[in-house]
Amino acid sequence: MTRARNAAQHHKNPATSSHFLPCELWTTSKVCKMPAARWNPNTLLQIDEGSGLGMYNAICCLLDDISMKLPQQVTKVELRRLARLGLCQVHGYQRKEVVAKWEDILGCIEGISRTYEHQREEITQDLKKLQKEVDECRSLLLVKEDCKDDLSVVLRRHLKRNARLKKELVESQATCARLQKDFARLKGQKEETFRLSAENSHLSDLLKSAEGEQERYKSQETNLTAECEKLRKQNAALQADINSAKDHYKDLQDREQSATMELMAMTSQLHEAQSLNLGLENDKKTLQSEIDILKREVEELNDKNTSVSSQLASAAASLKTVTEELCAANKENMEFRDELITATREMMELRNKVRQLSTPVWYRVIRWIKKKLSGLGHLRSPGKEVSDAEEGVALAPTASGRDAGLA
């Protein structure tokens, strides 16, 4: 960028500081051997300032060649070469826009140049006519001595022509100022067009990016649709499994109700057995108290009377009979205990099945069963057993066996 500005600095001080020059200043100097610069392409084409484009050092030679020509003589090939040298690789796509902008500027300069050329030709013709009249006046002054009338006529004509030329000069200056304003306005329009073109390019890039984003969203939508369809199928399968589980739950509920009825029946039987066992325990306690009384009487009367021995023998016989009855009752109690153990096992199996159901109803049933079982355990409290030494007959412990079975 520095080299480009240094190259363009060479063209910042041309023969005139104006953006365009009259055609009479484009003529070649007779003193210099090399042709002089006819215009300043650096300023007109805005190479150094205004566009912000980078340049290479090779532009200097090309600008020197272009400055030796008229603006309308600059070819499109030279403009393309200048744009190719001035633009970097990133902004190479703007070459056509820059060349078109330069062509428009050169076209405007060509129109202005033609206007000045036409005015120059008119001024040249007027100068020739004035020179001719001056020559005529000089010839009249040299040839005729009495030429005051002719000289006054020529002078008046010259003054009128001079006034007309001044008026045309003022009009030309006004036209020049108007053209300069038009050129400045056109310059602003071209810069605005260039800016809008850059914005259009940026918007095109954004549009391409948005289209790519839209395609990506469409792909995501397709994937999500397929995923939703897959989830819908899985939901249908899960719904079928839920319906099957509900049917299985109803079956288990029916089985639980039947098991509950059986449990209630067995519970009533258990209550009856407990009441029977309680009666046997009371009989046993009564007999135990009678045995104690008899033992004390035997100890007191053993040394006094032999008749008491016969009574004791009869009492022993009656005790044997009672013992046999107790053994029979104990046997029945053992059989009932086996049935109770079997019922307890079935109840434990039913409890395990009910425990597998994660429903508050089954928890309440289990709590109710535990409560009933704890109540049954309190009802089946063991009584005092009779020692073998005092009784003489070995009795099986009913209460301890029953508690072990329930446990």
Image (cartoon, rainbow, N blue to C red):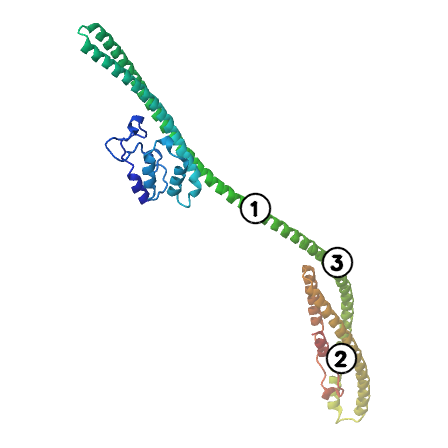
Q: Report the residue marked by disc 1.
A: 215
For marks 2 and 1, give the one nearer the viewer: 1
Residue 188 is at least partly visible in this image:
no
Residue 272: give x, y in percent of width and height: 78, 70
Q: Report the residue marked by disc 3.
A: 247
Label 3: few (<14), some or many (≥20) within 10 Å? few
Q: Report the residue marked by disc 2.
A: 284
Residue 207: give x, y in percent of width and height: 51, 41
Residue 165: mark: none
At horizontal 28% and vertical 18% (from top left) the residue drawn is 128
Q: How far apart are marks 2 and 3 (CA)?
A: 54 Å
What is the three-letter code of the residue carrying label 3?
A: Asp
Q: How far apart are marks 2 and 1 (CA)?
A: 97 Å
Against 30, residue 134 (above or below) is above
Quarter occupied by the N terminus = top left
Q: Is mark 1 on a helix, strand or loop?
A: helix
What is the three-letter code of the residue carrying label 2?
A: Lys
Q: Tell me: 227 left or right of 243.
A: left
